[in-house]
Image: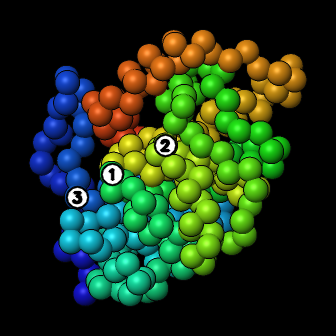
């Protein structure tokens, strides 16, 4: 049985939050839009990467294994239980979403987990260095991006899930050495927003380090102020809507 959603965003007029225009989509539509936004941003070079969204009944929305992010539409979305059994939809879930379940168990505040291996995050993960806040655009990660310094192996078993979820702790993101990153937040919009921003922050960090060798970090007090401003729900949701509008109309 397919999820009862349409392939296109809701026909309802765009909502406004604090004067900013935001979209109005179901969870399945937001998941599908996130997949295609990430594909456009270069996060889908291989089959690696997963998105899950926790539902009120304890089930999870996700995408079928062996489907590229750019292929996903709302009708592709499947619903699974916490044993990875398919409740709705076609195909089989990616076994790597098992480690997402560890995050959800530890973090009742988390409703969406995104994990990918985009090029610059992957390159930064190979250096053994954490993400640094040396630019205003990286301040959403100030004191909010953990670092797992040792790769525990393919995240398809419980031990990897335990290690990764422990490394994440109470933060929204974690950079995974020799691997990629994880965003775990209260909403699809927030996880997608940080997923886009972390790849750009990793790119800027690598460019700056290659040019000069070291970074001038942002003042911590100013970084905290900027973090709190840029993580406001109105800005997060408006950013998600902006990314969605940049997709081809036929894709929406």
Q: CB atoms at circles 1 and 3 under 8 Å apart?
A: no
* Residue 131 position in % (x across, y down): 67, 36
CA separation in Å, label 1 and label 2: 11 Å
Q: Residues within 10 Å of mark 1 (few under 14, many from 20)?
A: some
Q: Quadrant of the N terminus?
A: bottom left
Residue 72, placed above or below residue 222? below
Q: Residue at x 54, y 79 (%)?
A: 95
Q: Which residue is mark 3?
A: 26
Q: Residue at x 86, y 28 (%)?
A: 210
Residue 123 visible in image: no
Residue 170, placed above or below residue 65? above
- The front one of 80 and 147 is 147
Name the N-terminal-most of marks 1 and 2: 1
- Left or right side of 212 for 102: left
- Left or right side of 219 for 5: left
* Residue 152 position in % (x across, y down): 72, 65
Residue 225, placed above or below residue 151? above
Q: Residue at x 35, y 62 (%)?
A: 53
The total number of labels drawn is 3
Image quadrant where residue 203 sits: top right
- The front one of 14 and 212 is 212
- Left or right side of 196 for 16: left
Q: Residues within 10 Å of mark 2 (few under 14, many from 20)?
A: some
Name the N-terminal-most of marks 3 and 2: 3
Q: Which mark is residue 87?
A: none
Q: Which residue is mark 2?
A: 171
Name the N-terminal-most of marks 1 and 3: 3
Residue 245, placed above or below residue 90? above
Q: Which residue is mark 1?
A: 109
CA separation in Å, label 1 and label 3: 19 Å
* Residue 70 position in % (x across, y down): 50, 62
- The front one of 141 and 44 is 141
């Amino acid at each position: 049985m397919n999820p009862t959603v349409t392939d296109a965003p809701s026909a309802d007029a765009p909502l406004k939050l604090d004067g900013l225009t935001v979209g109005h989509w179901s969870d399945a539509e937001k998941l599908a839009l996130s997949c295609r936004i990430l594909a456009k941003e270069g996060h889908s070079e291989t089959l690696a990467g997963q998105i899950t969204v926790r539902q009120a009944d304890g089930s999870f929305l996700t995408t079928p294994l062996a489907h590229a992010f750019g292929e996903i539409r709302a009708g592709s979305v499947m619903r699974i239980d916490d044993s990875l059994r398919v409740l709705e939809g076609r195909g089989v879930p990616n076994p790597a979403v098992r480690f997402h379940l560890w995050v959800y168990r530890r973090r009742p505040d988390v409703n969406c987990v995104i994990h990918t291996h985009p090029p610059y995050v992957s390159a930064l993960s190979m250096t053994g260095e954490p993400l640094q806040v040396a630019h205003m655009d990286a301040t959403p990660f100030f004191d909010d991006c953990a670092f797992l310094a040792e790769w525990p192996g393919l995240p398809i078993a419980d031990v990897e899930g335990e290690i990764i979820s422990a490394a994440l702790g109470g933060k929204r993101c974690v950079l995974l050495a020799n691997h990629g990153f994880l965003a775990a937040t209260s909403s699809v919009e927030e996880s997608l927003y940080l997923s886009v921003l972390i790849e750009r922050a990793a790119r800027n960090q690598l460019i700056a380090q290659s040019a000069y060798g070291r970074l001038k970090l942002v003042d911590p007090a100013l970084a905290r102020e900027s973090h709190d401003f840029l993580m406001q729900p109105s800005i997060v949701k408006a950013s998600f809507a902006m990314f969605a509008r940049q997709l081809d109309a036929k894709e929406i």
